[in-house]
Image (cartoon, coloured by chain):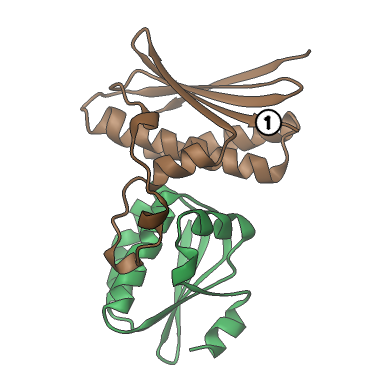
Amino acid sequence: MNVIYTTAGNILIIAIEGSIDSNTAGDIQVNLYERVAEATNVLLDLSEVDFVSSAGLRMLLLIYRQIKSRNGKVILSGVSDEIKDIMALTGFINFFEIFQNKADALNSF
Amino acid sequence: MNTTTVSGTFTATLDSLGSIRKFISDSGRTLGLDSGKTYKLSLAVDEIATNIINHGYTESGIKNGRIDITVSSDDKVFSVTLEDTAVPFNPLESKIPDEAALSIPLEQRTIGGLGIMLARENVDEFRYHFSKGKNINTFCVNLK
């Protein structure tokens, strides 16, 4: 799994590529939470993510909490139908704004 | 009725999760399971395998653990069986979040139980039994 960090103005864009499972989530979390700790607005782009397990949901939850505690905004883009399914099943979907693509997501901040 | 069976053995470490999912999806593709059902089955297996690795083996101090996986398919049902010799653990006895728990705002939520829930709810049937020192977790998906 790869994680690419970029910024657009005051928005931190986190693009993840690959599968988010207990193994890969463990590999990236230290770096990821350090980056998120300095951000107020986060766009998480999942266009290149082919698999998310409960470890990925836990990651989403922790990012969401960090950002919300600073009254920031978390937006998701490129979420596949399979990932939307598990977000719906676990009640996560109601708490996230989800856009089809990165450009629309960026415009909504 | 024709039954096809494929087996594999995996080291019980988290870096096996990718190869376990690949084994499930390759078998699913070969044996005619559609991609949506294959994804859900891989997720269910990933969650239980993660539990076996983290709680069953690692936290219990059992070294050199393995997970044996058997995939089998007939005309009606595609099934996956995971066998391990970690501490006994029955996922059917775990409390899974109910509707009320799943509507709690994320700020106040406890995260526990989601993995087992995803495992149980992404297949048509989930079974567990303990026999001859082995945990046996079985996942079934109806082909039609």
Return the x and y of residue B8 as percentages of the image width and height.
54, 22
Is any atom of residue B18 visible in this view?
no
The answer to which of B58 and A99 lies nearer the viewer is A99
Return the x and y of residue A15 as percentages of the image width and height.
50, 70
Q: Which chain is brown?
A: B
Please name the residue shown 45% across and 60% down the image: A91
Determine whether, in the image, residue B51 is placed left or right of residue B125.
Answer: left
* Above or below for A76 versus A24: below
Q: Quadrant of residue B124?
A: top right
Give the residue at mark 1. B142
Determine whether, in the image, residue A71 is placed left or right of residue A95.
Answer: left
Please name the residue shown 31% across and 48% down the image: B112
The answer to which of B138 and B82 lies nearer the viewer is B138
Determine whether, in the image, residue B100 is placed left or right of residue B46.
Answer: left
* Above or below for B22 versus A38: above
The answer to which of A44 and B142 lies nearer the viewer is B142
Please name the residue shown 63% across and 59% down the image: A81
Which image quadrant: the N terminus of chain B? Answer: top right
In the rendered image, the residue lying farthest to the front is B100
Callout 1: chain: B
The answer to which of B81 and B108 lies nearer the viewer is B108
Return the x and y of residue A86 as percentages of the image width and height.
52, 54
* Above or below for A31 versus B96: below
Describe the element under mark 1 as helix, strand or loop: strand
Give the amino acid at mark 1: Asn
Is any atom of residue B134 visible in this view?
yes
Please name the residue shown 55% across and 41% down the image: B122
Q: Quadrant of residue A100?
A: bottom right
Q: Which chain is green?
A: A
Determine whether, in the image, residue B138 is placed left or right of residue B32.
Answer: left
In the rendered image, the residue lying farthest to the bottom is A9
